Image (cartoon, coloured by chain):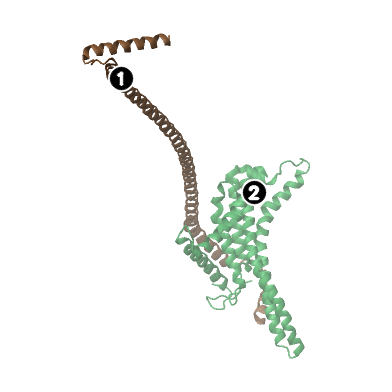
């Protein structure tokens, strides 16, 4: 699943549009927030206010509410970067001409989910030592004769399935949205080209449906950025307080 | 567009779940750069602004509380002063009333004393005038009596010394008589 490259032009491998968009997203996010945070006024201007709203959303609604306590500040940069990196790369899919959510290519989703996977395992080990793996897989208060069933399930769900679902959820929603919009577009094109006037007219129905799907996709793009970040926060919280779960 | 999808579909020997390594590399590096900028600049800048704002708001609240306390203290003081002033005014009014009454009483007393003095003076004057009248009456009565007696007797009782003695004796007798009658 790879578009022909930009450099060298049309090649099967090389520097692609998706890579360009990923780099562009880093530039966009860094520029916006550096400009917004630069003035540091007590009474913020419009740009600073927008930046603070966006930053405060991740900081308070995700990091503080989920992780809580005194040490949530340590994880704000990761959650903040994840949220806006995914958000901007998803929104690409809703912008005409660009129209390519970066995470409809699975590689990026694997990388981010992998970073998160190793982060929360690292946090768990750092916090609880090697005992963390026991805390994470052996639930307390379960009768010993059920443990042979529960422990394998816990191992599979926490350490094997979790990173896969984490990455594929993002990738699949973006790919599906991308496909639907593409499919609707080519469907309209096909119908408009028909000789039969009635058949031509049905393209309007597809157009209406496509616009509705486009709106839904835009919502899902923002939602998936939120879901990915929220799950990251939940995984980190679980690793931090493994002993009380 | 159609061709593109068809080519992608026919090309689909590679599964959509197989990642392109270069894309992974770009995302990894891009995300690392973003993380660096966020950790190094963006989060500290926002946190600094937040902290400053929180401090400014808390400082403002403290200042407002202080001002409130000062204002209520001043109000209390003004009320106290007003009460004091009212009490003072009352006191002054009472004093004035008492003083007025005192002055009235004094005047009355003075007037009474004056009238008493005038009465006493009048009494003294009357007494002295009466005394003078008595003295002049006595000498006049003496002269009159001697003249009358001389005419009756036909003899000039010009010997003043003797006549005076006679008159005095007569008057002394008269007075004795009066004294006896009074007793």
Which residue is at a point 72% across and 79% down the rendered structure image? A206
Residue A142, by quadrant, is: top right
* Position of B107 relative to A80 (above/below): above
The residue at the far front in this view is B154
Tell which of B119 and A34 is nearer to you: B119
Residue A105 visible in the current orientation: yes
Q: Secondary structure at mark 1?
A: helix
Nearer to us in this view, A213 or A153 = A213
* One can see residue A79 in this view: no
Chain B: colour as depicted: brown
Task: Give left or right: position of A7 versus B114.
Answer: right
**Depth order, front residue of B77/A120:** B77
- Is B156 located above or below residue A107 in the figure? above
Q: CA distance from mark 2 to mark 1?
A: 152 Å
Please give left or right for residue A199 compared with residue B80 in the image.
right
Q: Chain of mark 2?
A: A
The chain letter of the green chain reads: A
Residue under label 2: A238
x then y, percent, for residue A205: 74, 80
Neighbours of disc 2 within 10 Å: few (<14), some (14-19), many (20+): many
Q: Which chain's residue wears label 1?
A: B
Q: Which residue is mark 1?
A: B141
Residue A78 in percent (x, y) is at 55, 56
Tags 2 and 1 touching, CB below 8 Å: no
**Mark in front: 2 vs 1:** 1
Where's the N terminus of chain B, which quadrant? Answer: bottom right
The percent coordinates of residue A54 (x first, y second) are 56, 61
């Amino acid at each position: 699943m790879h578009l022909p490259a930009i450099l060298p032009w049309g090649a099967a491998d090389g520097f692609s549009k998706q890579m360009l968009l990923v780099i562009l997203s880093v530039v966009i996010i860094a520029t916006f927030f550096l400009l917004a945070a630069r003035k540091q006024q007590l009474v913020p201007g419009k740009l600073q206010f927008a930046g603070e709203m966006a930053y405060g959303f991740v900081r308070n609604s995700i990091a503080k509410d989920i992780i809580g306590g005194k040490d949530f500040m340590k994880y704000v940069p990761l959650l903040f970067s994840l949220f806006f990196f995914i958000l901007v790369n998803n929104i690409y899919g809703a912008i005409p001409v660009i129209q390519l959510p970066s995470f409809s290519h699975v590689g990026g989703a694997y990388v981010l989910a992998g970073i998160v996977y190793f982060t929360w395992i690292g946090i768990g080990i750092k916090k609880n030592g090697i005992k963390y793996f026991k805390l994470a897989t052996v639930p307390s208060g379960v009768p010993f004769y059920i443990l042979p069933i529960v422990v394998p399930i816990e191992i599979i769900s926490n350490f094997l399935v979790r990173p896969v679902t984490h990455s594929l959820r993002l990738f699949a929603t973006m790919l599906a949205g991308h496909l639907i919009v593409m499919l609707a577009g080519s469907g309209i094109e096909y119908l408009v080209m028909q000789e039969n006037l009635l058949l031509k007219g049905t393209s309007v129905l597809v157009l209406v449906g496509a616009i509705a799907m486009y709106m839904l996709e835009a919502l899902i793009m923002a939602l998936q950025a939120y879901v990915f970040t929220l799950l990251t926060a939940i995984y980190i919280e679980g690793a931090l307080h493994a002993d009380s779960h | 567009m159609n061709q593109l999808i068809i080519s992608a579909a026919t090309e689909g020997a590679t599964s959509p779940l197989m990642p392109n390594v270069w894309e992974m590399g770009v995302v990894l590096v891009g995300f690392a750069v973003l993380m660096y900028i966020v950790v190094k600049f963006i989060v500290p800048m926002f946190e600094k602004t937040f902290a400053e704002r929180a401090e400014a708001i808390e400082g403002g609240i403290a200042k407002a509380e202080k001002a409130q306390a000062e204002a209520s203290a001043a109000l209390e003081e003004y009320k106290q002063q007003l009460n004091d002033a009212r009490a003072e005014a009352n006191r002054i009014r009472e004093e004035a009333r008492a003083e007025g009454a005192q002055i009235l009483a004094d005047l009355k007393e003075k007037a009474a004393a004056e009238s008493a003095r005038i009465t006493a003076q009048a009494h003294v004057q009357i007494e002295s005038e009466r005394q003078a009248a008595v003295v002049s009456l006595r000498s006049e009565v003496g002269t009159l009596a001697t003249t009358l007696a001389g005419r009756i007797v036909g003899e000039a009782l010009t010997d003043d010394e003797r006549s005076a003695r006679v008159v005095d004796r007569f008057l002394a007798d008269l007075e004795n008589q009066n004294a006896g009658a009074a007793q």
